[in-house]
Image: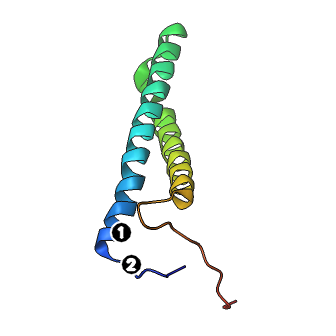
Amino acid sequence: MERLEPTRQLALKIWWAFIWRAVIIAVLGGFAVGVVFGALSVAIRVDPQALNGVSGLLGLGIGAVVSIEVMFRILKKKFNGFEIALLTTDEE
Protein backbone atom coordinates (compact mmCIF):
# COMPACT_ATOMS: atom_id res chain seq x y z
CA MET A 1 0.00 0.00 0.00
CA GLU A 2 1.43 3.33 -1.08
CA ARG A 3 0.80 6.42 1.03
CA LEU A 4 -0.44 9.36 -1.05
CA GLU A 5 0.43 12.91 -0.15
CA PRO A 6 -2.64 15.13 0.10
CA THR A 7 -3.22 17.33 -2.94
CA ARG A 8 -5.86 19.93 -3.62
CA GLN A 9 -7.29 17.66 -6.33
CA LEU A 10 -7.71 14.79 -3.85
CA ALA A 11 -9.12 17.19 -1.29
CA LEU A 12 -11.64 18.40 -3.87
CA LYS A 13 -12.73 14.83 -4.65
CA ILE A 14 -13.22 14.02 -0.96
CA TRP A 15 -14.96 17.34 -0.25
CA TRP A 16 -17.31 16.91 -3.20
CA ALA A 17 -18.13 13.32 -2.21
CA PHE A 18 -19.05 14.63 1.24
CA ILE A 19 -20.83 17.89 0.43
CA TRP A 20 -23.29 16.78 -2.24
CA ARG A 21 -24.47 13.85 -0.12
CA ALA A 22 -24.71 15.92 3.05
CA VAL A 23 -26.62 18.75 1.36
CA ILE A 24 -29.12 16.51 -0.43
CA ILE A 25 -29.86 14.37 2.63
CA ALA A 26 -30.06 17.42 4.93
CA VAL A 27 -32.43 19.23 2.55
CA LEU A 28 -34.67 16.17 2.25
CA GLY A 29 -34.61 15.65 6.02
CA GLY A 30 -35.34 19.32 6.64
CA PHE A 31 -38.22 19.22 4.17
CA ALA A 32 -39.71 16.15 5.87
CA VAL A 33 -39.43 17.76 9.30
CA GLY A 34 -40.93 20.98 7.92
CA VAL A 35 -43.92 19.09 6.53
CA VAL A 36 -44.44 17.29 9.83
CA PHE A 37 -44.13 20.50 11.86
CA GLY A 38 -46.45 22.32 9.46
CA ALA A 39 -49.08 19.59 9.68
CA LEU A 40 -48.67 19.47 13.45
CA SER A 41 -49.12 23.21 13.81
CA VAL A 42 -52.29 23.07 11.72
CA ALA A 43 -53.63 20.03 13.62
CA ILE A 44 -53.13 21.59 17.05
CA ARG A 45 -53.85 25.12 15.82
CA VAL A 46 -50.55 26.63 16.81
CA ASP A 47 -49.04 29.54 14.95
CA PRO A 48 -46.21 28.09 12.81
CA GLN A 49 -44.03 31.02 13.91
CA ALA A 50 -44.24 29.73 17.48
CA LEU A 51 -42.37 26.59 16.42
CA ASN A 52 -39.45 28.47 14.81
CA GLY A 53 -37.07 28.02 17.75
CA VAL A 54 -37.80 24.32 18.12
CA SER A 55 -37.62 23.68 14.39
CA GLY A 56 -34.33 25.57 14.18
CA LEU A 57 -32.77 23.43 16.90
CA LEU A 58 -34.19 20.30 15.33
CA GLY A 59 -32.75 21.35 11.96
CA LEU A 60 -29.35 21.88 13.58
CA GLY A 61 -29.53 18.41 15.13
CA ILE A 62 -30.57 16.81 11.85
CA GLY A 63 -27.72 18.57 10.05
CA ALA A 64 -25.19 17.32 12.61
CA VAL A 65 -26.45 13.73 12.46
CA VAL A 66 -26.51 13.78 8.65
CA SER A 67 -22.96 15.21 8.46
CA ILE A 68 -21.58 12.57 10.83
CA GLU A 69 -23.28 9.74 8.93
CA VAL A 70 -22.08 11.03 5.56
CA MET A 71 -18.52 11.42 6.89
CA PHE A 72 -18.66 7.85 8.22
CA ARG A 73 -19.71 6.58 4.79
CA ILE A 74 -17.02 8.64 3.02
CA LEU A 75 -14.38 7.11 5.31
CA LYS A 76 -15.51 3.64 4.16
CA LYS A 77 -15.78 4.59 0.46
CA LYS A 78 -13.33 3.38 -2.15
CA PHE A 79 -12.58 6.21 -4.55
CA ASN A 80 -11.12 5.80 -8.02
CA GLY A 81 -7.50 4.95 -7.25
CA PHE A 82 -7.50 5.56 -3.49
CA GLU A 83 -9.36 5.22 -0.25
CA ILE A 84 -9.18 7.13 3.02
CA ALA A 85 -7.37 5.28 5.80
CA LEU A 86 -7.12 6.07 9.48
CA LEU A 87 -3.72 5.15 10.87
CA THR A 88 -2.67 4.88 14.47
CA THR A 89 0.31 6.85 15.68
CA ASP A 90 2.77 6.06 18.43
CA GLU A 91 2.04 9.39 20.08
CA GLU A 92 0.07 9.39 23.31
Question: What numbered label is drawn on residue 80?
Answer: none
Query: For the point 59% across and 73% down, which residue is it?
Result: 86
Residue 32: horizontal and vertical position, in percent? 47, 25
Question: What numbered label is drawn on residue 11?
Answer: 1
Question: Which amino acid is tagged 1?
Answer: Ala
Q: Mark 2 points at which residue?
A: 6
Of 62 and 70, nearer the camera is 70
Indicate whether 45 appears above or below 24.
above
Of 68 and 76, nearer the camera is 76
Indicate whether 6 appears above or below 58.
below
Residue 48: horizontal and vertical position, in percent? 42, 21
Query: For the point 56% across and 47% down, which residue is it?
Result: 65
Query: For the point 51% across and 34% down, which residue is it?
Result: 54
Q: Quadrant of the N terminus?
A: bottom right
Left or right: residue 33 compared with residue 20: right
Indicate whether 45 appears above or below 57.
above
Q: Circle 1 sits in a helix, a strand or a loop, which is it? A: helix
Left or right: residue 36 compared with residue 17: right
Q: Quadrant of the C terminus?
A: bottom right
